[in-house]
Amino acid sequence: MLTIGLIGLGFMGKTHLETYLRLEREGLPIRVAALCDIDAEKLEGRSAGGNIDTGGAAIDYDRFAKYVSVEDMLQNEQLDMVDIALPTYLHKDVTVQCLNSGVHVLCEKPMALSSDECDAMIHAAEKNGKQLMIGQCLRFWPAYEYLKAAVDEGTYGKVTGGYFFRGGSTPTWGPWLLEKEKSGGALVDMHVHDIDMIHWLFGKPEAVSAQARNVIPGSGYDIVSAHYKYADGKVVGAQADWTLQGDFGFEMSFRVNFERGNIVFGGSGLRVNPAARQDSLRSFPRIWAITSS
């Protein structure tokens, strides 16, 4: 049995909690034992502080031990791991605190606001012999898993180019997101997903160039376009924009071109366009499983 303490009950923290409870109902050996948030209203399941209703099943908050102090939770609970779903500027200090207390840590993305903070988190994990995982969820998203397999296995030959996009309206579920020193703006909070994907798929680039701008007063970079240079000459770019207003909603997409076809993902699901029918025979059943879910 894996015993979990969840720190932070904003939009993402509540989403994590609902997922843990679903996995528990499905029979996985996990149990959320304790909740921690500085806002006591959230510990009772109330939507204080801009929390968004995620539309999940009703949660019995009386079943959890509740804390407004991370230190108190760590001292009073026998936990195997903690899940940190706090604003980005708090990630480093709370992660190091938890690792030093002897528990494993799952920390939401982005990891932290600087490479020095990231290094401190890694050092704490290594020093204490504990696991530290960052919630880069796209690595477990079926469409991106399929793309990764196609790249690694050379299903359609070598990659010749790729484009990744992530964008939507300006976030409103946490005022800290629009404070440069707390979130880093769309560059750090949103673009980090596609940065991680590009590194995961293609490895570390030789160089990166980017153009970005601030649109929202006080925010970080709200629009960013980046280009990645690789030794084999593949053309790779990524863009993020959280200033898309009106009825745009949210979109994440990619388009990756290979020597013998291309793979495209967007609002209509995952689509494979092989150059020859025989290239698609092995992969189409997997695509159908993705698009029909």
Image (cartoon, rainbow, N blue to C red):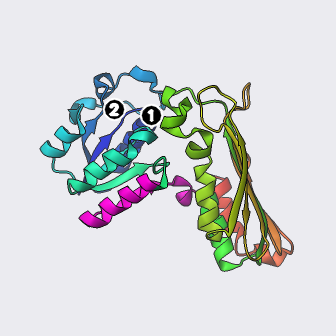
In the orientation shown, which residue stands out farthest toward the right? 275
Residue bearing the label numbered 1: 56
Q: Would you say residue 271 is visible in this rendering? A: no
Q: Tag count in the figure?
A: 2
Quadrant containing the N terminus in the rendered view = bottom left
Judge from the rendering whether residue 191 lies leftward or rightward of residue 228; answer left or right.
left
Q: Which mark is residue 59?
A: 2
Asked whether 287 or 45 is in front, the reply is 45
Q: Main secondary structure of the magenta part?
A: helix
Image coordinates of residue 149 in percent, x first then y, are: 63, 72
Which region shows up in magenta?
116-141
In the orientation shown, which residue stands out farthest toward the left? 76
Q: Which mark is residue 43?
A: none
Which residue is at a point 64% across and 39% down the rendered structure image?
Answer: 221
Image coordinates of residue 236 in percent, x first then y, are: 75, 62
Which residue is at a point 61% across and 60% down the rendered structure image?
Answer: 197
Which residue is at a point 33% across and 50% down the rendered structure image?
Answer: 95
